[in-house]
Image (cartoon, rainbow, N blue to C red):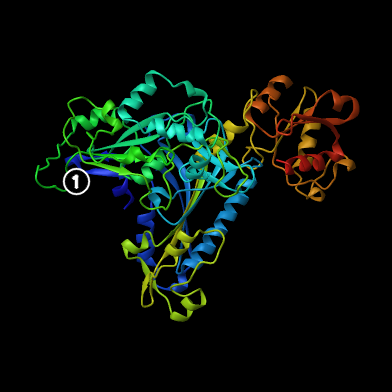
Amino acid sequence: MIYGINREGWKSVARRKESRYLLSPTHEEEITSLVDSVIKSYKELPLRLYQISRKYRDERRPRQGLLRAREFVMKDLYTFDYTPSLALETYNTIRKVYADFFDEFKIPYLVAEADAGNIGGTLSHEFHFPNSRGEDHVVSCNNCDYIANEELAESRVQNLAKLKDTDSRFQDSSTVVSEDLETSVEKRSRHPPESEQDPFHIDVAIWTGITQDKLSLVNAFYPCKSLPYRPRPTKPNEVNIHAIKSIVPDLDAGTENPIDLWRTNFQQFMQDDNASVPVDKGYSKIINIFDYRLPSIFAGSTFSNHADFPLSAHLPSYFDKHIPTTSVTQHPTKAGPLDLLRIKSGDPCPRCPDGQLKTQKAVELGHTFFLGNRYSKPLGASVTVPAEYLSEHGGIDNRIDTKSIDDEARSASSRRSISGNEVEFQMGCHGIGISRMIGAIADTLADEKGLNWPRVIAPFEVIVIPSRGLEKDAADIYDVLVANNKAEERVLPSPELNNQAAHIDAILDDRQRDLAWKLRDADLIGIPIVVILGRAWRSDKKCEVKCRRLAGLTTEVRADELAGVVSSLLAQM
């Protein structure tokens, strides 16, 4: 099902006789079919299946080490319940477990509302580490808890009608734009008007793409510089590709020269002079999409050679025949105007009246999907459940009463999905990119000295490093740190060392190298806490404790206090 939706970025191989195989990027279909073949009773539900394996993507440009690779390790969890309400409880439980998991790293992270994309489902969240090298963009509000990925995020739509009625500058700008558009566009590009500093002046930009069948040219019209609800930005506006793709799902946004490609694959639409011939899918056509901020005159054309059609200035001159054209000013599935602009920091929040949005780069590390019957229905995966159990858990038409799911998702999830007592599995899928997580954490915390691991994934929590001549004392200190509350089972050299040691994963560096080399190596490896036996030990029997992650903390500690101090520092990491 997924492979039929979008093959871009997926790795396939060819064998003898040109047989083609896919290195599966995800396994929802296989898991669903497997469960359907082995689950015979509702008593075997709920079911949770983990899959930890390599996955593959046909990345065009692998880069940034583990952050963008063609092969990576993924931990997936597939969940199966027999009612939507139970499945949603499972989904929220796993979301909390994921949050607890990322809390252990003691690194700021974001949980963003997300678009389900090709995987499908009615509810989805992503877990991100903010990182300047990240390729995802996360949008958050400075006044409320709104956080969403760029694909799903939106800013508050402004009331342009009110602005037009109350602000003469915007009225004048509309009048200017409503001239012959081809002339107006060319004139504006060559001779900016005197009102260039007018914050309500509108310059028109056109983004052009093509559909995957190479027959439909997609043009998105949007204001390239100024918006009526904020001062002129320092940078031109950018079009939101995700917004366009939500209108044209088969958009191929990666084509560099869409007009040339469309022209090469052009199939003329023939129209009888005396009768209208319906547009055939096999003919080339144009789809024009208009941002809500532009005057309505832009959407008034039917064919590409219309007198007011602005794209004629951008097409080759020999395209003088009728080309079927569709103008889109409203979203086909959502109520409201079309916002085609990429969100910028400072845009108004859609959830609260006073908030402003902030955009930041991030690395996606985890994703949760509430699938419902997205896969079980087409694959016929079901189980028989007694009626009393269905009524106990909300029935077959139960309404999901929760703040964590919107009206649209609630309606889809509570739709009747059974015939009699034969119930389709209600599913969820959840994943954490293990290898990418390692790369993201390393990149986020590393400094000029080397890696700087969090406690939970560091190779060791503590390293004990002695200077020359103190190797025996260092071994005693190591024994203190690893005593694990069983000091009575050990014979330590002095009573003051028989303290109640914490559970600490330590290592003793007894290599025959000088102290400076060992310290540099410990920093390079990224061990969180370094315990040094040096001058302070020789003079006062104190260990020097260093911790780079805690603002470069350095302190001297007596041996009988060492385990407690180290445990306290580890609790902060």
Q: Position of residue 300 (x, y in %)?
A: 30, 41
Q: Which residue is mark 1?
A: 281
Name the residue nearer the viewer: 568 or 121. Answer: 121
When the figure is inspected, residue 300 is found, relative to residue 202, above or below; the finding is below
Locate the C terminus by quadrant.
top right
Q: Amino acid at mark 1?
A: Lys
Name the residue nearer the viewer: 149 or 153. Answer: 153
When the figure is inspected, residue 395 is found, relative to residue 333, above or below; the finding is below
- Quarter-of-image position of residue 249: top left
Q: Position of residue 322 (x, y in %)?
A: 17, 36
At x 77% / y 34%, what residue is drawn?
Answer: 475
Disc 1 element: loop
Name the residue nearer the viewer: 73 or 302. Answer: 302
In this picture, residue 473 sits left or right of residue 59: right
Q: Position of residue 449 (x, y in %)?
A: 65, 23
Residue 227 visible in the picture? no
Q: Residues within 10 Å of mark 1 (few under 14, many from 20)?
A: few
In this picture, residue 249 sits left or right of residue 363: left
